[in-house]
Amino acid sequence: MNNRLPIYEIERDIIARLQGDRRLILSAPTGSGKSTQVPQMLLKHGLLGDGQVVVLQPRRLAARLLAKRVASELGVKLGDEVGYQIRFENVTSAKTKIRFVTEGVLLRQMIDDPKLKGVSALIFDEFHERHLYGDITLAQALGLQEQYRPDLKLAVMSATLNAGELEKYLAPCVTLSSAGRTFPVEVEYLPHRLGLNAPPVWEIAAGEFSRFVNSGGEGDVLVFMPGGFEISQTIEAVRSTREAKGFIVLPLHGELQPKDQDAAVARYDRRKVVVATNVAETSITIDGVRLVIDCGLARIARYDSNRGINTLLIEKISQANADQRTGRAGRTAPGTCVRLWSRAEHDERVPHEMPEIRRLDLSEVVLTLKAAGVEDLRKFRWLEKPDEISLTHAEELLEDLGAIGHDQKITPVGRKLLAFPLHPRYARMLLAAQEYGCVHQACLVAALTQGRDLLLRNCGKEVDSAREDLLGEKAGSDFWILMRAWSYAFNHQFRIDACRKLGIHAVTAKQVGPLFDQFLRIARDEGLDTRPNEVKDEALQKCILIGFSDRVARRLDQGTLRSELVHGRRGVLARESRVQHSPLFVVAEIREVEGRDREVNTILSLATAIEADWLRELFPDDIKREVQVQFDAQQKRVLAAELLRFRDLALAAKRIDPPPAEAAARLLADEIIAGRLLLPNWDHHVEQWLARLDLLCQQCADLQLPAITDEDKKHIIAELCHGAVSFKDIKEREVKPVVMSWLSQSQRELLDKHAPERLTLPNGRTPKVNYEPGKVPFISLRIQELYDVNQTPKIALGRVPVTVHILTPGMKPIQVTQDLASFWREHYPKIKSELARKYPRHLWR
Ligand code: ADP
Ligand code: MG
C-alpha cells in the first residue's frame, strides 16, 4: 500500500462512516488514491467479513488496470485476491476479495442474484460521469440495502462532485472530501479559431509538443484525442518530429491489447508521451505528466432522434471536463496545459455535460430494469427522473420490437436482447439475421446507420449520374446503395478524390469499417454465425423491417412522395431515395428540416421496401382488420370500408356495400340527434305526445308510465333508422307509431285519459290541449265558448288545473287564468259592457 497518498488523511473517517451509516460519499481529486486505496482499506479494517468489495468502473480499461495495480500493491496474483470482470472476461476466483467490474456486469449480477450474496460492499467510482447504468445500479443498491441487506456498505466516489443532491438522495449519508495535493497548471489557448483549412488536429498537437520541448519543458506529456484513429495519427505525427528523440510515444485507449495498455502506464527511464482518450481524464492516473495537450474533443454518447438510436459522435467536451484534463499536468509538479481551441471558443462551451439520463435513449435501460423486476418505472427511485416523453418512447419502442408485451412485462425475446451490449433495435435485428442467415450483412447495415451521412446530398448533376452508373438507380433498399458506395470507397482506400467523384464522405466511410468489425465481434461473442453467406435480398429486408418496425411507412398516393407512418406520423420520402417503386417501406432515418416557407418538413430516408405479406407473416398480432363506417355529409349516406391495419397504420381499404346495418343506423341516429339531419315526420304531433307522457310521468307517478329519457330517445331514433343507410331511406318514415310503441295498449289508454289530446267541457266543446314539457298545459277559447264552464278544468287525475287563455271574439287575449270561477265572478262583470260594445254582433250573457 501506498500510505503517502492523500486519501490516507481521511482513512479513519472513511472506515467509521462505512461502519456507522454504511453509506458514504467521497470526493477527492484524481490521483488521491480513491480507486486503488479505498478497497484496500475496507479489506484491511475487516469491513468485508467473508464477502468481497465490488468496485464499479465506467470503463473496461480502467477496471483492468486498477485491478492489476491493486494486485501488485498487495503482492498477489491478478485473479486471486484481486480481480476484475468485464464483458466476456472474468479474471476472478473464489478467493477474490476486491473485484473491479464495469457497470453492466454488476447490474446483470443483480438481475441473476437480487440479494448479491457474497458482496459486502459496493463502491461506485467515477460517479460524476453520471452514466445511466451507474445511476440505476445505485438506485437498485439503495433499495437492496433498505429491504434485505442492511449490512451492505455503499460508497460513492468521484473527483468532482456536486454532492448536495446526491447527499439528499443517499440520506442518511455524509460527504467526506480530501483536498489532495496539486500544483498550479498554466493554461494556454490557441490565439484564434482553427479555420476550415487548418491542418489536422494531430499535426497541431505535434507542433505544440515540439514547442514545449524546445522551450526547455520538463517531464512527461499527455495528449488527449477522441478515438483510436486520431490517436494513431497523433503518434505518427509526434514520432516524426525531431524533438521526439529520446521520448517513448505510446497510445492508451480501450481498443488496445492489454499489454499495450500496460505499457502506457508503466514507468520508463526515458521521458514519455502518452496519447489517450478521455480514460486518462479521471479514471487512470499517469504520473510525472507536466504538459497536457488537449484537443478538446471526445466521443460522446447521445440520442440521435433522426435515427432513433444512441450514437457516439465526436463532440466538444465541456468546460468542466477540460478543467479535469488540465489537472493531469499538475500531479507531481507545476505544469502546463495547451488547449487546441481559442479562449473565445472556450467561453462558448457548455459548463458541464448533461448526465446520460438526459441525453440518451432509454430503451436499453428500461429493458434492463424490466428484467430486474421493476414494474412501474415511474415509481422507480431515480436519482434524476427522466422525461416522461423519453420513458414512454422507450416503452413504445420495446413493445414494437416485441421485447415487452402489451402488459409491459419483459418477453422471452426481450431477455435474449439483453445479452447484447447494443441498443435493442440492433440486438433485435441481429437476432432476426441469425434466423435468416444474414448476420454478416446485418452488421454492415447496423454500422452504416451509426455515423454521419455517407452520401452527401445535393452534389450536382455530374455526381448524380456517376452515382447512377456505379451504384444503380433503383434498389430494394437504400442500404444496398450505401453498401455499394462503401465498398467502392473501401476499394479506393477511402481516397478523397475517388470519394468526391461519387459524393461520398470519406471520413465517414472510413469509420464504417471499425464499426462493422465491432458489430461482427459482438455478434460472434453472442454465438451468432457471422460468415458472409449469399442470401436473398428479401432476407435482409425482413431483418431491417424487424429492427425498424416502429418506422413502417406507406405512400399516400402515387403522384407524390407523401407518406404516412405508424404512430400517427407523416412525412415525405427523400427525393434521393431509390425505393420509390414500393408503396410500403421502412425508414432508418426521420429528419425534420425547415422548408422554404418556414414549415417543418419531415423527411424519410434510408428506406427499405417491404411487402404487406411480410407484415402479416412477421407481426400476426399487429395486423388488424377493421370495418370503418362513417357518415358522408355530402351524399347524406353512410359509407363503409374494410381497413387492413398494421398497428395504427392503414395498409389497404376495401369498400363494403351495403354498410353493416347496425352501425349505419347508429350513425344516422347520431346525425339526427345532433340536429344535422331533420326527420320531417318528427313533427308537432310527436312532440305533443312526448310532452303528454312527460306530464303524467311527472305528476302521476302512481300511473307507472315509463318515462322517455334522452337516452331512450336515442334508442327510438336508432330503431327508426333500422335498415337505413342514407337520409333518403329515412326521410319518409313514419315516426309517431314508433314513438307510440313505447307504451302498451293499456298504457296508451291511460295517457289518452289523463293527458287527453282534447278536453270535453261541460258545454260540450272539445278544445285541444297544448302541452309543453315542464309547463302547465293550456287551452285557448273565445269567451263565448266558455259560457257554462264555471270551474277550471283539471287533468292528470285532477291534479293539474289547465291554464285557460280567454280570447275576445276577435281572438285578442282577455285573460290568462287558472281560476275560471273567480274570472266569472270578479272580472267578467267589469269588462262585459265594454266588450259588448266592441263586438255588438255576438251573444253576451
Ligand atoms: P484516484 O482514484 O483518486 O484518482 P488512484 O487510486 O487511481 O487515484 O491512484 C492513486 C495513485 O496511485 C496515482 O496517483 C498513482 O501515483 C498511483 N497509481 C495508480 N495506478 C497506477 C498504475 N497502474 N501504475 C502506476 N501508478 C499507479
Ligand atoms: Mg480513480
Image (spheres, helix red, strand yellow):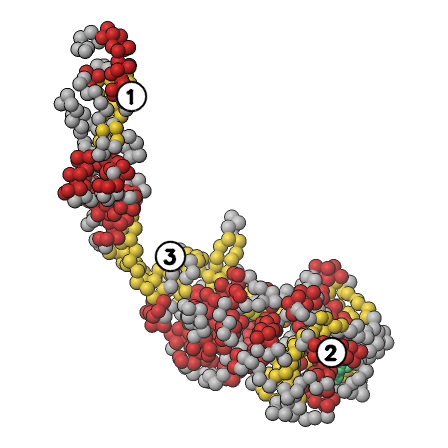
Classify 487 as above or below 796.
below
Which numbered tag is attached to residue 556?
3
Q: How many neighbours does mark 1 have within 10 angstroms: few (below 14), some (14-19), or many (20 or more)?
A: some
How many marks overall?
Answer: 3
Pointer 3 or 1: first along the chain:
3
Q: Is residue 189 visible?
A: yes
Q: How many neighbours does mark 3 have within 10 angstroms: few (below 14), some (14-19), or many (20 or more)?
A: some
Which numbered tag is attached to residue 140?
none
Q: Is residue 204 visible?
A: no
Dots 3, 1 in contact, CB < 8 A: no
Q: Nearer the viewer, residue 180 or 361?
A: 180
On screen, residue 837 versus residue 298, left or right, reads left
Circle 2 — which element?
helix
On screen, residue 761 versus residue 67, left or right, reads left
Q: Nearer the viewer, residue 363 or 583?
A: 363
Pointer 3 or 2: first along the chain:
2
Which numbered tag is attached to residue 16?
2
For badge 2, the amino acid type reads Ala
Badge nearest the viewer, 2 or 1: 1
Pointer 2 or 1: first along the chain:
2
Classify 87 as above or below 607.
below
Q: What quarter of the picture does the C terminus occupy?
A: top left
Real-space Cα separation, disc 3 to disc 2, in angstroms: 69 Å
Q: What quarter of the picture does the N terminus occupy?
A: bottom right
Badge nearest the viewer, 3 or 2: 2
Classify 519 as above or below 589.
below
